[in-house]
Amino acid sequence: MSKGVRLERVAVSFTLKDHIYDALRAAIMEMDIYAADADLRLDERRIAEQLGVSRTPIREALARLEQDGFVEIQPRKGVFVRRKSLDEVLEMVVVWAALESMAARLATERATDAEFRALRKFALKACEEGEGARLAEYSDKNIQFHQRILELSKCNLLVRTANDLFMHMHAVRRRAMGEGDRLRRSVVDHMNIIEALETRDADTASRYVREHTERLHDHIRRTWLKLEQLGRRGEQDPGPGDSAVSPVASSTVAQAGRTGD
């Protein structure tokens, strides 16, 4: 069965090209673009039929997606979903670290106690729901956690810039995330970050966020190279997105939740 892009029809409106752009980007982000059987080619005619629109706004949306780095338009060949290289992903993580560490610092000054309590509640619930879940699902919650820290900075430009990175990270999450030990470490890091935010310790919160993202940087590099090595050997990709979340992570966050009560 083809693992290509899946789309739903959209209603015609004066912002049609924006709707199409959003629909295509969302569909791309949900694809496992590194799977061996991933169909990366986007057929204009088929997309137009699926969405129930003409091909002109489709072309406009695809041009914008290329500009934003989601697709590549190859003359006389077609349009293809663009796979990020390891170097590109690591560069995004470096920028992410800089943005989020600043966001954490600003959050200690601008966010309310109620907002920090809501962040803690979200982190606890994400891990409770994550027990036995797929890594890709936990990864989505992980990205949302970091987006919430950005939002607590209450700096719109910072949030918009970071969200562009998160969209690309979402698309590569199955390739970039991995073993249960990483999840356990992630839970511990998240709770440490929350505690630093709650005490409004700007230096510590900023440092915890930066160190957490630096560990992610190293983890992605190791996982990515390992998968490439397996691919070269002709072995079947173990599919990190198909693994289950370690129950150790849930027990860790439950303990942290009791501390924060």
Image: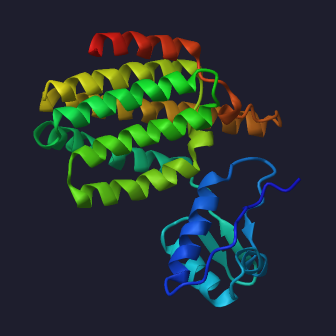
Q: Looking at this view, name the residue that lies furthest to the right.
A: 1
Q: Quadrant of residue 83?
A: bottom right
Residue depicted at 63% across the width and 82% down the height: 58
Total marks shown come to 0
Residue depicted at 43% across the width and 13% down the height: 254
- Would residue 206 be seen by someone viewing this image from the given angle? no
Residue depicted at 59% across the width and 75% down the height: 20
* Side of 79 relative to 195 (left or right): right
Residue 125 or residue 75, whichever sits in front: 125
Residue 207 or residue 247, whichever sits in front: 247
Residue 104 or residue 67, whichever sits in front: 104
Quadrant position of the C terminus in the picture: top left
Image coordinates for residue 165, horizontal then vertical, percent:
42, 54
Image coordinates for residue 148, horizontal then vertical, percent:
33, 43
* Side of 234 relative to 241 (left or right): right
Image coordinates for residue 146, horizontal then vertical, percent:
37, 40
